[in-house]
């Protein structure tokens, strides 16, 4: 009985060490991969950010216009007036 408790305790510790070793290895690999990445310069980042903001504003305007047209269309169909 004492051996069984000791084995289960040991296997728990071994599995915990194994998991923690995998987690540690994962973070080491992430750190190495991040060092190999090519990061954009500040000017490239600013240009990309501006492009995304302009695209989102354009999309928002497009969706708003389509929504207004759809609202008038549905109102015309249901009531017969604008």
Image (tube, rainbow, N blue to C red):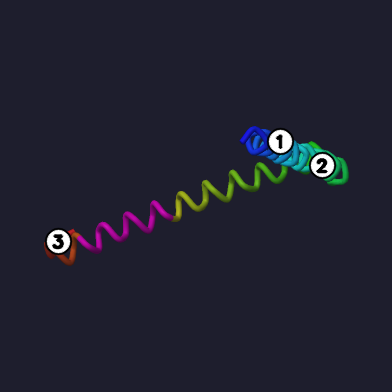
* Distance Cα–Cα, label 1 vs label 3: 80 Å
The overriding secondary structure of the stretch rendered in magenta is helix
Q: Which residue is mark 3?
A: 81
Give the secondary structure at mark 3.
Answer: loop
Residue indicated by mark 2: 34
Q: Residue at x 69, y 38 (%)?
A: 7
| Quarter of the picture holding the N terminus | top right
Q: Mark 3: few, some, or many residues within 10 Å (few <14, many ≥20)?
A: few
Circle nearer the N terminus (2, 3): 2
Q: Nearer the viewer, residue 12 or 38?
A: 12
Q: Earlier in the sequence, mark 1 or mark 3?
A: 1
Q: Residue at x 82, y 44 (%)?
A: 29
Image location of residue 13, percent across then percent down: 70, 34
Q: Nearer the viewer, mark 2 or mark 1?
A: 1
| Residue 65 inside the magenta-drawn segment | yes
Secondary element type, mark 2: helix
Give me the C-alpha separation between circle 2 and circle 3. 61 Å
36, above or below 74, in the image: above
Identity of the residue drawn at 86% across and 42% down: 32
> Mark 1 packing: few (<14 Cα in 10 Å), some, or many (20+)?
few
Q: Nearer the viewer, residue 43 or 10?
A: 10
């Amino acid at each position: 009985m004492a051996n069984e408790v000791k084995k289960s305790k040991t296997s728990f510790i071994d599995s915990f060490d194994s998991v923690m070793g995998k987690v540690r290895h994962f973070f080491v690999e992430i750190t190495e991969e991040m060092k190999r990445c090519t990061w954009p310069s500040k000017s490239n980042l600013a240009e990309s950010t501006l492009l995304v903001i302009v695209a989102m504003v354009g999309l928002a305007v497009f969706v708003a216009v389509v929504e207004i047209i759809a609202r008038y269309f549905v109102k015309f169909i249901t009531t017969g007036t604008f």
